[in-house]
Amino acid sequence: MHLNVSFMLEDFPVVLKALPVTLGLTVLSYAGAFLIACLFGAVILHKTKVLYPLILVFNTVVKGIPLLIQLLFCYYGIPQLLKLLSEKTDLIRYDPKHLSYFAFAAVAFSINYGAYMTDVVVSSFKAVDPGQREAADAIGMTKLQGIWYITGLQALKISIPGLSNYFMWLLKATSLASITNVFELLATSRASTADNYAILEGYIVAAAIYWAVCLIAEHLLKKLNQAMKQEEMINEHGRTGTYQKEAWWKRNPERCEPVR
């Protein structure tokens, strides 16, 4: 097997220009998925009468349909929905020549990964000590204040490893957006080989860029996870030290301060 190394070196900067599209699609889709996961998780945790069964059914349907089909559904279905809305209302103007296939792909990724990330959000909140919620109620906090200041932060720390994995999977899954006319890394590498048919070389270049980006993203996410764990250990040590000091003073009210 002979690889055209000179072409690969020339093709590398060409494919690399599509990296902002891949990263933008990843970040936008992940933000949408996280928002969906938080909303769906809140419904599931509180078991809202009407929405709770609907969310469960919706998540089951989304998880049971391949992501590729969901991308194609958004690719063909959203334009039809926009066309219908433009005919029935004056809210939007349908222009088939200027459709945002990037946004359609982001919607598909957000819905798909949001359904899976909902399980992470729900399990993370359930892993928080119930005494934390009782303490928030005891000091007069509302449910929203308790989530924002106490249980939400703890659940976020618990969920970071799982959410980090989904970010990595989503970053690589964006390559499927090439079937919906989104010129990310894979589509750009395929188009760059149209003249000399060096298809294998183009895929190798795309794979190398994906690999490098994933290594950097994984390293940054590990640093984030370590920082959160270290902060939690410091806070826990501070709370424990305070409790021990108060207990010592209760037992020894007339003695000097204990040596640390």
Image: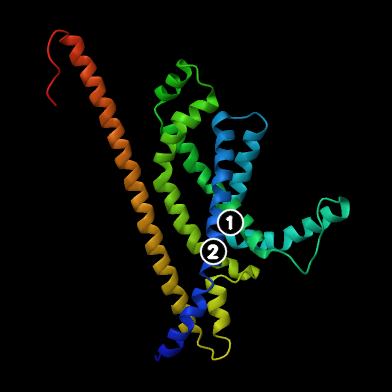
Instruction: Compute the Cα span from label 2 to label 1.
Output: 8 Å
Direction front: furthest residue: 256
Secondary-structure class at tag 2: helix
Question: Which residue: 49% across, 61% down?
Answer: 171
**Number of numbered discs visible in the structure rendering:** 2
Q: Amino acid at mark 2?
A: Thr
| Residue 204 image point, x, y percent | 44, 79
Do the CB atoms of the residues marked 2 and 1 lie less than 8 Å apart?
yes
Which of the image's four quarters has the N terminus? bottom left
Q: Answer whether residue 252 is visible to the viewer in this image.
A: yes
| Residue 61 image point, x, y percent | 62, 49
Vertical comparison of 110 with 199: above or below: above
| Residue 60 image point, x, y percent | 59, 46
Secondary-structure class at tag 1: helix
Badge 1 density bin: few <14, some 14–19, many ≥20, Cα 10 Å: many
Instruction: Using residue 223 as the reference point, say whether residue 187 is left or right of it.
Output: right
Q: Answer whether residue 64 is visible to the viewer in this image.
A: no
- Tell me which label, 2 or 1, sits earlier in the chain: 1
Vertical comparison of 120 with 244: above or below: below
| Residue 127 image point, x, y percent | 41, 33
Tell me the tag on residue 109.
Answer: 1
Q: Amino acid at mark 1?
A: Phe
Q: Which residue is mark 2?
A: 174
Direction top: furthest residue: 254
